[in-house]
Amino acid sequence: MKYPYPHLEVQGITSQKVLTTIRSLPRELFISSEFQEVAYCDSALPIDCGQTISQPFIVAYMTEKLELKETDKVLEIGTGSGFQAAVLAQLAKEIYTIEVHEELSKKAQSLLNKSNFNNIHYKIGDGKKGWLELAPFDKIIITAVATEIPSLLLEQLKVGGRMILPLELETEEQYLVLVKKLAEDKIEKQKLIQVKFVNLK
């Protein structure tokens, strides 16, 4: 496909860097053979361990909202297929990604290492605890829904940094929320678009 995801601009994605990056990635590499025919549809698709690869628009939207810089150190919670990490790795300096499912992490590591993504670092474990020994991080992205902002991750975010994550409200509706850390004890939250993610474990 020469020009995947032509809808992204219509849906509001304006960053040319994000658009170019996501369109340069062959999404079919990150999904199983049975879904190859719909690899470039704008929808989430099943992957192993009951997880999903996010729809291209959501990957682009979350990435754009982080306002990544080439010098950024980014923490990703939920490696999944590795697609989001591959996008981040082309826009920031170092990516540290945590996955609770060992099978998913190893599969993503194998794929991304073969693709020469040398600035992605992997950890298998509880993403809610973050990666304390490597904190603080300029940006944090969480790709599974929580009912509240994980406090340990907020502590590992630099002052001036950004975090984006899906949160489930009392109504059971899920929304992306952008968190800006203004000071060690002060944050600003912005409710964005409604989404549907798997649960943060």
Image (cartoon, rainbow, N blue to C red):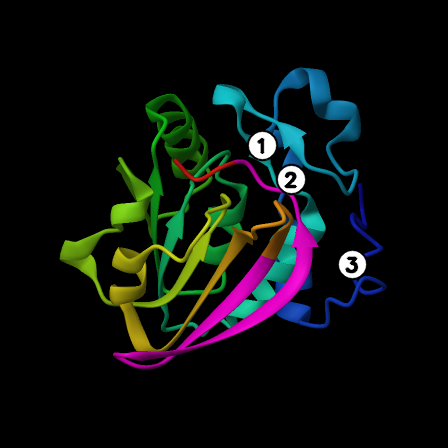
At label 2, counting other C-alpha atoms closer than 10 Å, the crowd grade (few under 14, some 14-19, many 20 or more) is few
What residue sits 71% from the left and 22% below the top? Answer: 35
Between marks 1 and 3 in the image, the one whose residue lies nearer the viewer: 1
Between marks 2 and 1 in the image, the one whose residue lies nearer the viewer: 1
Residue 140 vertical position relative to residue 184 in the rendered view, above or below: above
Q: Which residue is mark 3?
A: 8
Q: Which residue is mark 1?
A: 52
Quadrant hosting residue 94 = bottom left
How many callouts does the rendering have? 3
User: Which circle's residue, 2 or 1, is located before the other in the chain?
Assistant: 2
Which amino acid, by three-letter code, is at mark 3?
Leu
What residue sits 53% from the left and 22% below the top? Answer: 50
User: Magenta residues, as a range?
Assistant: 176-198
At label 1, counting other C-alpha atoms closer than 10 Å, the crowd grade (few under 14, some 14-19, many 20 or more) is some
Q: Which quadrant is home to the N terminus?
A: top right
- Label 1's element? strand
Q: CA distance from mark 1 to mark 3?
A: 20 Å
User: Which circle's residue, 3 or 2, is located before the other in the chain?
Assistant: 3
174 displayed left or right of 51: right
Q: Is residue 22 visible?
A: no
Which amino acid, by three-letter code, is at mark 1?
Thr
